[in-house]
Amino acid sequence: MSQRTATALLAMLTLAVSLGPVHVKAQQTQSDEMVRRAKSKVQPNYPELAKKMNLVGTVKIEVVVAPNGSVKDARVVGGHPVLASAALEAAKKWRFEAASAESTGVIDFKFEPR
């Protein structure tokens, strides 16, 4: 096998391994103000660029939940920028139990390969 063929084969194997299945797990952490349970959770899509870069990590999203349980506002409070936009979009789609007032909490999205 020539050096060029071996290099190309190694590059293809590396790419195949890095594009393997990825698991995203979301966990709601409670802040002092947030005592509502999530009724529906949307998991983020793992961004293609993150797959290519083989990125793993946790993105923290702070959410303001309206009395009706919808997410009124969301912002990234920590995590890799390449993963953050996917986590932010997913957090905006979460739904919580209704309450008499707004509340604030943090959702942790963990991006990790399977």
Image (cartoon, rainbow, N blue to C red):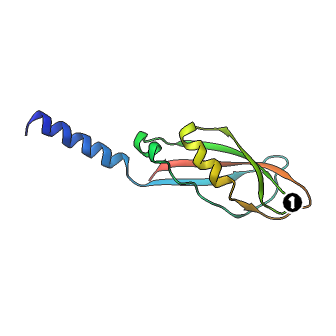
Residue 58, image x and y in percent? 59, 43
Task: Tell me what residue is drawn at x 25 percent, y 40 percent.
Answer: 11
**Quadrant in the rendering for residue 10:** top left
Write the residue at 83% across / 56% down: 66
Q: Is residue 2 left or right of residue 66?
A: left
Number of numbered discs visible in the structure rendering: 1
Q: In the rendering, at what x and y percent does residue 54 appear?
A: 42, 42
Would residue 78 be found to the left or right of residue 30 on screen?
A: left
Q: Is residue 73 left or right of residue 78?
A: right
Where 91 sits versus 76, above or below? below
Find the residue positioned furthest to the top.
3
- Name the residue rendered at 60%, 45% in the picture: 85
User: To which quarter of the image does residue 3 belong?
Assistant: top left
In the structure shown, which secondary structural element does the residue marked by tag 1 occupy?
loop
Q: Residue furthest left?
A: 1
Quadrant containing the N terminus in the rendered view: top left
* Name of the residue lying farthest toward the right: 100
Q: Which residue is mark 1?
A: 67
Residue type for callout 1: Pro
Q: Residues within 10 Å of mark 1 (few under 14, many from 20)?
A: some
Query: Which residue occupies the foreground of this view, 92 or 19?
Result: 92
Q: Nearer the viewer, residue 103 or 73?
A: 73
Residue 40 vertical placement versus 110 (above, below): below
Residue 63: horizontal and vertical position, in percent? 75, 49
